[in-house]
Structure formats: structure tokens, C-alpha cells
Image (cartoon, grey):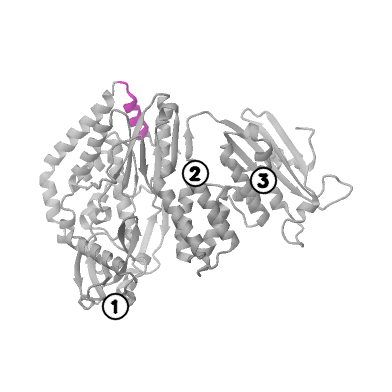
Amino acid sequence: MAVGELVQRNIEFCNDPMGLQFRRMQCEFSNKLVKLCSDLKHVEVTIKQNMPEHVRQVLAPKRLALFTKLLVDMDYPDSKIADEMSEGFPLCGWLPSSDVFPSRARAPEVHEDYLRKMARSLSTRAIAATSSCGCLESDEKLWQATLDEVSDGFLEGPFDPEAMGPGCVASPRFGLQQKNKLRPIDNFSASQVNSATGLQERFVVDSVDEICAMIKAWMQKSGSGLKLLGKTYDMKKAYRQIAIRAEHLDLAWIVVWDPVSKKPAVFRMVTMPFGATASVGAFLRLSQAIKAIGIAGGGLVWSSFYDDYVCICREGTEVQTDRMVRLIFKSLGWQLSTDEEKDRPFSNVFQALGVEFDLRGVPHGKLLVGNTSSKKEELNDRIGAVLEDDSLDPHVAESLRSRLLFADAQLYGRFSKMALQRIGSVGQSRHTESPLRWEVKQSLEWFRELILSSPPRVITCEHRDVFFLFLDGACSAHDPCDAWSGTSVGAVLVDSRGKILRFFGHVIDQAMVDTWGSPNQTQHVFEAEVLPYAICLEVWQDVLCSSALFAFVDNEAAKASWIAGSAHSAIAKQVIHNGTRLEAPLDVHPFFSRVPTHSNFGDDPSRGRFSKL
């Protein structure tokens, strides 16, 4: 993954031994921000006067004229986002295009007119379905969190459900327990508001890989001796800092169980809800714009994941970097979290997105990325509880699979597909599994051991040998007179200069082939095409260790299965599991590609032809 040109420029500025370019850039941008805040003061007042009342209250600290000016000056493709912000964002309909994210249309499933015609029915259903969750403490926490949002100006209410107008749509609110707090979630899917939302783009966020790419790019440009620090900045209640468009306020009602009066109560939102598709689209556009300002103007090396900004700096520049980040957010009027747990100082070991980044090996060209100890403990406890109960609910299975998938990605991320599929199958079944099947129980136990004991990912700048691997499987009718009839496999290993290093061809014993699939199955070409790569990892470990490997296959299904890390065929699935299990300790980085049969070096040895090789 490559980082952008401006990020690379900022890295080079920071690498300046005297640090003059970095300091000059930050001083000039700081002076520009201060001057623009003063020059645009009267423009800001005019913009605020033209806003709807609820938008003006929500955006009171924001400097929208400054936001627009900075984006226009840098020719940012989505500079119109500031004007849209001043009007409030829509909750449904076709969301505006940003020209920042990749294009991919997803039409609304229902029209906005349908929502308004069915408003009374949808709201009545949501109100009727709202009741106690069965735990008084959780009910009280959710109710208090809702009242706190009223005090903060995010909601209006509480109201009696009869106070809602005929065109108002109510969405149910529920609480999601996260560590030591309960997060209110507004289910805008249940009210079909999300179904009335159309997307023109595929929204993407900077994830762990983007952070790793920035650090690796810095290591590559700097050589040995580099010392880096990292920190995560978190926005305070990010969605609550932007407003809903006035004409969609009647679609922004929520219904909550009141544990005092023991009946549902309704509130009207004025800020974007946590649970609406439109909120994600609006905020990601804002998040990307702020990130772009920091990179282009502030000389920052950072990434954004929703409301989390991960910033990397050279040791000795953390004070200037921190000042610049805070100046950007303060100038634009965005609030950062001051929670001690989130607002930690720059460090060579820091956490972001539930992942721990260890920069202590950066001077030697090594970055470690792994799961945090709290993440490991949480997953261990959740798996332990499921195994102890000998029962797994579908919703729990889906949530657990998602969390295990993310945790596995910080280790290696390819050899756990079989276990994930078994756990995920409970979620797809839509009924609680009790007692647990042996394979589900085995997968949970295997995953618990994997998460707790596996070392973190190692990302280095060391040179990797590059090899080309040509793989082939053949299947023909068994002929006693032809030693190479039946099912056979072959492979050829070539170095980066085109020199053939090793090759093999092998006819698989028919008794073994007969165990592949049903007794009536006569063709096993797919399994034969899958098998050679796993054999190569087993027999050529001494050469392939710590390599970058291009694996060429002339069978599309086999190629796709190795990329996916799984297959429908039981024997192919087992072969792939054993193969990917070897990739991690060997530290092999494979890339699978299709090769035409007539260009496949592996075709000859799979049929017993070795003269050319």
C-alpha cells in the first residue's frame, strides 16, 4: 500500500536534520490560520445568521468560512462540504457525491415519500415494540444517557408519543454495552429511514494498513536510527457536532423506554444520529477533509478512521506536532476528547482502533502490530463464556465472528478461515446452537489459543527474495499402461531472474484420490489444482522462507480459493488450511495470479515431462 505524495513530502520535511522545513511549514500555516480567523470573522457571523435556528446552535463553535477557504485554497475536490454542513445534512434520499471516494451507486430501497405516507404506521410499530430490556440498571443507564443528550442540546424532549405529528417517523433506541460505558444506538434501519437512503459512492476509511504504510514509508526513507512516536486523537461525540437538515427533522424522532414512568417516551434529534447511514456518509466526508487540511497545510503525517486520527511524528517534534493538531481542530471549531484514557501523550507504544503499535524497533527497521491486552482478555472471556454455557446465540455468533476476524488480521489473517466459517455458520442458521457441535467447539478453542499465544505482526524494511511459482494439476482416466495417468500434480520454482531453481512432478496414489469427495466422483481436477501450492510450502521451506511469492495457477477456481483462503470442497478446504498455516511461520507473502495453460511451466512436470526443465 502506497502513501500519498503529500504525506511523503511531509516525511521528507521531518527528516531534514535541522528541521527547518518542518518548522517553517508549521509556522506559516499557524500564522495563516490565526490571520484567516480574524479576517473572516464578519463572514462567519453572516453565515450563522442565515442558518436555521437548530443548525446555528449545533454549529455555534464552527468556523465554516475558514473551512471553505482552506479547502478551496488546496483545490480539495469536496470543498462544497462546508456549505452543506451549514444547511444541515439529510437523513435520507440520494446522498451528495464527494468526488473523494470511489464511485459505486446503491439506490434507495424505498422512496422518501413512502416513509412519510407510512410514518404513523412505522412509528406506532416502533413505539409498541419498545419495552424494558429486562435489566433495570441497563434501562436506567440508557434513559440517563438520553437525558444527558437533551442537556447537551443534541435532543429535544421527552415528549409523549401523542405529541408526534402525522408525518413523523420514530426509530427505536437501544443501549450497547462497551467496556465501562453504555453507548446509545439509534436503529434507523428498523424505521426504514436507512432503506430510503441512496449512496453514490463506496465510503472507505483509513484502517490499520494505512497506519502501517505511513510508518513503513518513513522507515524506508530514513534508514536506521529513526525514532518515531505515535498518538491517537479522538473527536468528542463526533456525530453530535453536526446538524440534521431542517426538512428531515420529522424523520429524526427516537423512542426510548422510560424506566420511571414505565412506558415509551419520544425525543426529536437535532444532531446526526449514531445508527443512520446518512450520518456515516456525512461525517466521513468531513473527516477526510480535515485530514487533508492537516496534511497539505500542517505538514502532518496522520490518518483518519471515522473520528479517530492517528498521528506519527519524529521523536523531538511531538510538542510542535501536538500544537498543530490542536490548533487545526480548535480553529475549525471541532472538539477533541479530553478523556484521560483517550487523550494520551505521544509514545513509542500506542494504541489505536483496538490495536497496539510498537515503534521501539523502528530504529532497526521493524514495526510490531498486535492486539491490545484488553482485546485479548475480552475475546478470551467471551469465548470462555460460550464454551462454559455450551450454547451460542446467532447474534452473539455474528458479533464474535466479526471481532475474531479483526483480531486475527493483526496476527496473520489467512489461516483461520475454516474456524471463522464454522463459528459464522451459527449466525447464518438463525437459531441458537445448544449443545455446540464438535467442530464449532474445536474452532472456538483453537481461536482462543491463537489470539492469546500468537506473536504480533512484524513489518520490516528488509529486502525479500522474490520467487515465481508455476503450479498445475492434471486429471485423466487411469490407464495401467501409462504411469502418468490418473491424478497428478507438478510445480516449478523460478527466481527473479528467470532461473529455474527446483521442480517436481508426482502421481497421486489412486487410493488417496478415492477419498476426495463422494464415491461416484470421477473428476478431481479442482483438488489437483489446489494441492501443489501446499506441497511447495512443505518441501521447499528452506528457499521460500521470508520471501515474496508470485504463485501462478491456470485454474480460476483454484486461484480464487487460495486468495479467499477457503473452498467449498472439503478436501480442498483442508489443503488450503494446512497451506496457509505454513505461510505464517515461514513469513511468506503470496500473490496469486492466473496464467494461461500454454504459458504454465508447471504443465509439463504434472504430466511427467521433464526434458525441457
Percent x, y for residue 40? Answer: 13, 43
Helix, strand or loop status at disc 1: helix
Q: Residue at label 2?
A: 411
380 with respect to 301 (left or right): right
The quarter in which the C terminus is drawn is: top right
Is 8 included in the stretch rendered in magenta? yes
For image coordinates 20% across by 70% down, the residue present is 158
435 with respect to 6 (left or right): right
Q: Nearer the viewer, mark 1 or mark 2?
A: 2
Q: Which one is nearer the viewer's eye here, 368 or 81?
A: 368
Is 489 included in the stretch rendered in magenta? no
Percent x, y for residue 440? Answer: 56, 60
Decide: is 292 above or below 17: below
Q: Nearer the viewer, mark 3 or mark 1?
A: 1
Q: Amino acid at mark 2?
A: Leu
Decide: is 193 above or below 475: below
Q: Is residue 595 visible?
A: no
**Magenta region: which residues?**
7-17
Q: Amino acid at mark 3?
A: Asp
Helix, strand or loop status at disc 3: loop
Q: Which one is nearer the viewer's eye here, 211 or 482?
A: 211
Q: Residue at label 1?
A: 120
Q: Nearer the viewer, mark 2 or mark 3?
A: 2
Q: Residue at label 3?
A: 554
